[in-house]
Image (spheres, helix red, strand yellow):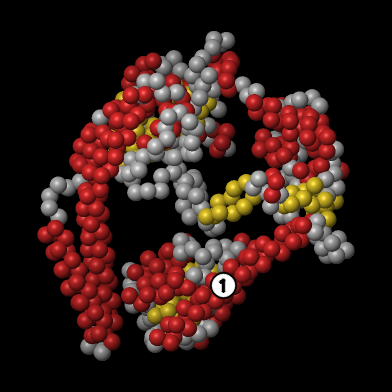
């Protein structure tokens, strides 16, 4: 009994539950139960997800638990209840079947897992009830907050903005409210006066606040533009706080993973703005007049229309697509300062790696990759796109070079036969262990090796099947690409900037900037868009259909020769 490898799993859904240590009660109960059975529980077999929703299976501790179970490192798993495993009953069944195939016995403290159809039905019903309760709680909470907002209750707001202090129900004699903080309110009124009366830009406001050593809510004396922008757009300062300014939707695909953050966030959702007409207003003490607030909104709109970018003429055609091949950070467009251009007009800007900006990382520069002129890189990538559209057979040739042209049918059949035999051997080995023919010392290494071999064969089979599927889809994809290229090839030379941007975002997945070359990585959608005539359409850089990529390299030697006066200087420039 003491040779059993035991593990526990615990989870809480929200950050608030994680901060209040509610998960500690789950872990304590699981540890105590394992101890009463006389089993040892290693610290590395305690899998805990803090603040992760049970509606998704992509959780760090759960992923690690599944990997350890698949490797044969666990014999028995203890969980408090099925809804700690997953909220969705389909996810519960999937996990239980996966652990059963791996030879892991799953035990819930609040109920036993039986093998009869009635027990399985009871588990599914319990999962459905948990999922229903979650949806019911969320809907009840949403409806309750909305009703409270319609009644003008301040308690539904997430917190008090700069200039106010939130007074809770217990502190506020049964009703929550906003109290004015005089020192912060003075700063708010000054900011609105600078924009509404003096017609200052947000950058000028930040400079004045920083020069005056005014402190933010966190105590900083350096003000960010985003902080001032949020302040000027907040209707609470005119006496009507807004509820429901944003809504939650499923997580949208990203161009690349965020640096320093997990690929799957704790809350797998995206936030989008709600039209102003749908906001609910809640009365709060006003800091500025309604006339001044509306004057500030008009000035902000005027500032946006009169942005000085048009004077320079630099537009960032590849924004959001450039990635540094040295450090992995994105490239961004940076204009030339008046001192650097020495009074001479420039029709271009520079693409610069974020990792080369020392001020972003505490004064330490992370990357020394050089900056590039926007006009040269834009033209190089555009020429690659034009060559692809003029000769789609080139892409087919490059793609076929990545595929094995040999017949895979005999190899696939042999692998499937070997996989079937191996699975039969695993079943016989488990039966032998259950009947006591072999002991655990002999069983563990043999079952681990056989399971590892099964995973290798399954991966090889999937690779061959995917390769055959891609080969079958190739002719269809190339045929549609030829049709699409024929339609647009006639107008490539006359394409305006908006048309070029849409075509580049449709065909290019990313552009990697290395020290001596630029890699243009294409992606081809089986159903290219039909409207690329110059009209502005929605962004197409997040393609959800099945795609394949082709990498093209562009030598930067000629580009460097044309920009020798700027690039070496940029390397030694101090930030």
Q: Which of the pair 185/259 is nearer the observer?
A: 185
Q: Is residue 554 left or right of residue 345?
A: left
Which percent across, then down, holds residue 261?
Answer: 51, 50
Which percent across, then down, holds residue 468?
Answer: 21, 53
Mark 1 surroundings within 10 Å by alpha-carbon count, few (fewer than 14), some (14 through 19), many (20 or more): some
Q: Is residue 501 left or right of residue 521?
A: right
Residue at numbered disc 1 = 132
Seen in the picture, residue 535 relative to 453 is either above or below; the reply is: above
Which percent across, then down, holds residue 210?
Answer: 73, 31
Seen in the picture, residue 457 relative to 220 is either above or below; the reply is: below
The quadrant where residue 323 appears: top left
Quadrant where the N terminus sits is bottom left
Q: In the displayed image of the protein, which residue is found farthest to the bottom?
A: 435
Q: Which of the pair 325/532 is nearer the observer?
A: 532
Q: Is residue 31 left or right of residue 426?
A: right
Residue at image point 23% right, 57% down: 465
Please say whether residue 10 is visible from this viewpoint.
Answer: no
Q: How many marks?
A: 1
Which percent across, then down, holds residue 256?
Answer: 45, 44
Residue at image point 62% right, 65% down: 138
Residue at image point 56% right, 54% down: 249
The quadrant where residue 40 appears: bottom left
Residue at image point 70% right, 40% down: 230
Please say whether residue 169 is visible from this viewpoint.
Answer: yes
Q: Is residue 51 left or right of residue 244?
A: left
Q: Which of the pair 210/102 is nearer the observer?
A: 102
Quadrant where the C terminus sits is top right
The quadrant where residue 224 appears: top right
Disc 1, SS: helix
Q: Which of the pair 364/234 is nearer the observer?
A: 234
Seen in the picture, residue 451 relative to 437 is either above or below; the reply is: above
């Amino acid at each position: 009994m003491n040779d059993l490898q035991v593990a526990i799993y615990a989870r809480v859904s929200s950050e608030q539950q994680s901060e209040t240590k509610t998960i500690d009660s789950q872990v304590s109960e699981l540890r105590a139960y394992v101890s009463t059975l006389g089993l040892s529980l290693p610290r590395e077999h305690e899998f805990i997800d803090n603040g992760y929703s049970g509606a998704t299976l992509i959780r760090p501790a759960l992923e690690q638990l599944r990997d350890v179970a698949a490797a044969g490192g666990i014999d028995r798993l203890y969980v408090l209840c099925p809804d700690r495993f997953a909220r969705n009953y389909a996810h519960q069944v999937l996990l239980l079947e996966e652990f059963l195939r791996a030879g892991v016995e799953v035990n819930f403290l609040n109920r036993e897992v039986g093998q009869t159809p009635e027990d399985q039905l009871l588990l599914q019903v319990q999962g459905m009830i948990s999922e229903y309760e979650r949806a019911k709680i969320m809907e009840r909470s949403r409806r309750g907050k909305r009703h409270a907002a319609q009644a003008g209750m301040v308690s539904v707001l997430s917190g008090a903005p700069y200039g106010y202090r939130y007074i809770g129900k217990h502190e506020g004699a049964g009703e929550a409210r906003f109290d004015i903080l005089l020192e912060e309110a003075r700063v708010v009124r000054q900011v609105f006066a600078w924009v509404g009366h003096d017609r200052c830009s947000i950058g000028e406001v930040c400079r004045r606040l920083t020069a005056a050593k005014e402190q933010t809510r966190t105590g900083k004396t350096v003000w960010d533009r985003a902080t001032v922008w949020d302040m000027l757009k907040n209707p609470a300062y005119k006496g009507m706080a807004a509820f429901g300014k944003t809504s939650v939707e499923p997580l949208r695909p990203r161009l690349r993973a965020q640096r320093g953050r997990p690929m799957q966030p704790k809350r797998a959702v995206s936030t989008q703005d709600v039209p102003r007409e749908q906001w609910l207003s809640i009365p709060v003490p006003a800091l500025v007049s309604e006339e001044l607030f509306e004057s500030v909104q008009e000035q902000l709109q005027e500032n946006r229309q009169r942005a000085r970018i048009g004077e320079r003429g630099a537009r960032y055609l590849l924004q959001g697509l450039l990635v540094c091949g040295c450090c992995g950070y994105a490239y961004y467009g940076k204009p030339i300062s008046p001192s650097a251009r020495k009074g001479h007009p420039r029709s271009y800007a520079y693409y610069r790696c974020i990792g080369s900006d020392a001020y972003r990382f505490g004064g330490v520069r992370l990357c020394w990759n050089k900056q590039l002129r926007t006009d040269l890189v834009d033209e190089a990538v555009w020429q690659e796109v034009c060559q692809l559209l003029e000769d789609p057979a080139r892409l087919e040739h490059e793609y076929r070079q990545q595929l094995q042209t040999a017949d895979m049918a005999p190899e696939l059949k042999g692998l499937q036969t070997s996989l079937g035999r191996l699975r039969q051997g695993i079943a016989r080995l488990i039966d032998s262990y259950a009947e006591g023919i072999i002991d655990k010392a002999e069983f563990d290494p043999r079952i681990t090796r056989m399971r590892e071999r099964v995973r290798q064969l399954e991966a090889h089979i999937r690779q061959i099947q995917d390769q055959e599927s891609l080969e079958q889809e190739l002719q269809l994809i190339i045929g549609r690409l030829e049709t699409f290229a024929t339609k647009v090839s006639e107008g490539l030379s006359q394409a305006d900037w908006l048309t070029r941007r849409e075509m580049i975002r449709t065909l290019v997945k990313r552009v990697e900037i290395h020290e001596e070359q630029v890699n243009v990585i294409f992606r081809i959608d089986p159903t290219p868009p039909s409207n690329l005539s110059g009209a502005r359409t929605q962004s197409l850089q997040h393609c959800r259909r099945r795609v394949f990529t082709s990498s093209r390299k562009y030598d930067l030697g000629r580009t460097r020769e044309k920009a020798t006066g700027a690039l070496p200087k940029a390397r030694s420039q101090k930030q």
